[in-house]
Image (spheres, rainbow, N blue to C red):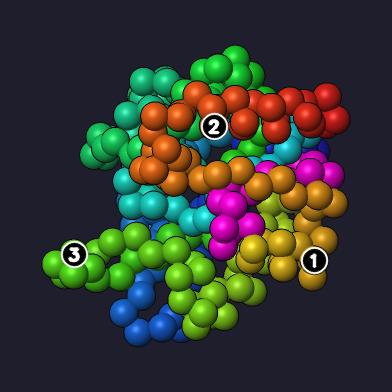
Amino acid sequence: MKSKTLAERIIDFNASLYFDGVLPEGIHVMNPFLENPSALAASSAFYRKYYADNSPRHVIVGINPGRFGAGLTGVPFTDPKRLVERCGITGYEGMITHEPSSVFMYEMIRQYGGEAAFYGDFYITSFCPLGFTRAGRTGREVNFNYYDSKPLYAAVKGFMVESLRRQLDFGFSGDTGFVLGTGKNVEYLSRANDESGFFKKLIALEHPRYIMQYKARRIQEYVDKYLDAFSSVKKTV
């Protein structure tokens, strides 16, 4: 029997994602693969394009999906605009949105050598593969991070740890993991890593959202930092 490619394993994982635990009052789970008809189809096309093999890759771990990026496309740090224009995925039928984090990531990917080269070496996921929202001051739902509430983290920690373990079992490299977020994301992931042994080593990089919001004039500096970090493991998979 022919073994599944990474693409099919990732797609099966996404399609199976479901959280049925109890969340703190006012916080809602965001599951693009159940709530957005385009997300599973678009992300499946993406993974079949770039992950139709079983070659080892290093893992990059973000926080959790946002409403205007992975919340629509199902692909971390990839908003609909870049999914279509940069990745050439034409089957997406949802809203075309612009997410600053995606702008940074795809500039970095361009300088790395392009989408095929980058995704041939790396796999991006999030510590929590599902997102969260809560009502903002105006009553509209806004993004909420898993670490923004200790009761939320307590409620979802087991799900997060199991989800990351399942993905690493696809055959990704466990020697060095990259963490997007030099504050709470690396703090929480480091603790979980000490307990579960996901990676032998973690390298933290500033989160793209932070870069675009606070360091926009220094984008190239951060692109260079990413590229330098990634080059340190490029030959070790």
In the image, what residue occupies the spot 64% across and 38% down? Answer: 123
Looking at the rendered structure, the kind of residue marked 1 is Asp
Q: Earlier in the sequence, mark 2 or mark 3?
A: 3
Looking at the rendered structure, the kind of residue marked 3 is Arg
In the image, what residue occupies the spot 32% across and 46% down? Answer: 68
State which quadrant residue 48 falls in. top right
Taking depth in this image into account, of 44 and 206 the one nearest to the observer is: 206
Extent of the magenta region: 171-186
Q: Could you tell me which quadrant the N terminus lies in?
A: top right
Query: Viewer-nearest of labels 2 and 3?
Result: 2
In this view of the protein, can residue 121 be seen by the observer?
no
Residue ID for mark 2: 222
Residue ID for mark 3: 140
Q: Is residue 216 above or below residue 130?
A: above
In this view of the protein, can residue 104 be seen by the observer?
yes
Q: x%, y% of residue 143?
A: 34, 60
Q: x%, y% of residue 183?
A: 57, 58
Q: Earlier in the sequence, mark 2 or mark 1?
A: 1
Residue ID for mark 1: 194
Taking depth in this image into account, of 184 and 77 the one nearest to the observer is: 184
Q: Do the numbered discs 2 and 1 sit on residues whose CB atoms are within 8 Å? A: no
Task: Provide the secondary structure element on which disc 2 rests.
Answer: helix
